[in-house]
Image (cartoon, helix red, strand yellow):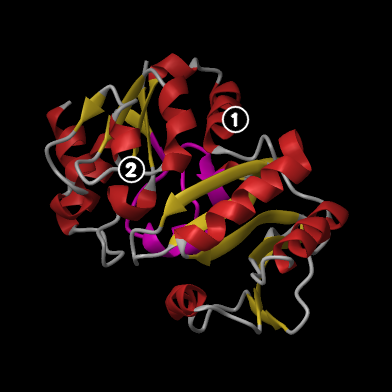
Amino acid sequence: MDSIYITDLDHTFLRTDLSISDYSATIWNNKTKTSLMSIATARSFQKSHDFLDKLHLDAPMILLDGTMIVTPEKKLIDIKTINKALGDAIIHEGEKYDIYPFVIALKDLKTLDEAFLFPTSLNLHQHGVLENYRNDPRMIECKNIRAMEMNLKLVYFGEQKELLPLHNHLQKTFGKELEYKLSPEKYSDGWFLTILHPEGDKAHALSKVMEYLERDAKDVTVFGDSVNDIGMFKLAGTSVAVSNALNEVKAVADIVLPHSNDEDGVARYLESV
């Protein structure tokens, strides 16, 4: 029976400059001859597709932190969204802290076209994040940002001292209606707070992928580096952290690699097994 490998992208399989080395691409594509290979990422279908154009994928992709599961052929398997009323309520509570989110939403369920809404009022960290999205056709600037009908996630960027009170307030206000992930942003010195559907995380998505493949979660090896990987780590048969992973991720990993994402840690492991 084929082995199954699912990797996070940013700071795990992708290098810090968002590239994939020829070595990693070669190892990955060789591995697909005997294994099922896919990704679990915070990124969208189009962004992931752009990064992985050199790679063969043959298992469903976990996208946008687990809110969407799509085959490489863009067949939708599962989706978890926040409705407009709840999305607007989140934004309203954030306004009390004078901070506004990015809203990643689905415009069309049939085509899976996405929208990336961003506020006119931006803090320093949000400006930095947007630099990575120049010329992205999904981008929509909003003077009065509000949620859409199908919201995949709302993301706040800022200092930890700004986001921690908001995180606590949203948890107190909405409780189990939502999933909240507060974590440092490795591309800068800021933090981010991601708000999701309560079943829109990588762990729930991994369960769905295993159901689709008619396999047990214990059959899969997963790779990651950040807090949004922890639930997936606890569910998978084997969890592997790159050497640059956060300490709380290493603490729950079965294996901590001696190599980082910039040293092709995932590919080195795949070659060794």
Quick one: label 1, few (<14), some, or many (20+) residues within 10 Å? Answer: some
The disc placed on residue 6 is: none
Q: Nearer the viewer, mark 2 or mark 1?
A: 2
166 sits left or right of 182 in the view: right
Q: Which of 3 and 80 is in front in this view?
A: 80
The N terminus - image quarter: top left
Is residue 119 a member of the stretch shown in magenta? no
Q: Position of residue 221 (x, y in %)?
A: 35, 26
Q: What element carries label 2?
A: loop
Residue beneath the point at 49% across and 59% down? 161
- Can residue 197 be seen in the rendering of this structure? yes
202 sits left or right of 52 in the view: right
Residue beneath the point at 41% across and 27% down? 233
- Compared with 91, 128 (above or below) is below
Q: Which of 162 and 140 is in front in this view?
A: 162
The C terminus - image quarter: top left
Residue furthest to the right: 85
Is residue 50 a member of the stretch shown in magenta? yes
The disc placed on residue 225 is: 2
162 sits left or right of 51 in the view: right
Q: What's the magenta region?
A: 37-65
Q: Position of residue 239 (x, y in %)?
A: 33, 26
Residue beneath the point at 17% across and 57% down? 22
- Compared with 98, 238 (above or below) is above
Q: Position of residue 52 (x, y in %)?
A: 38, 57
**Residue receiving disc 1:** 204
Give amino acid for label 1. Answer: His
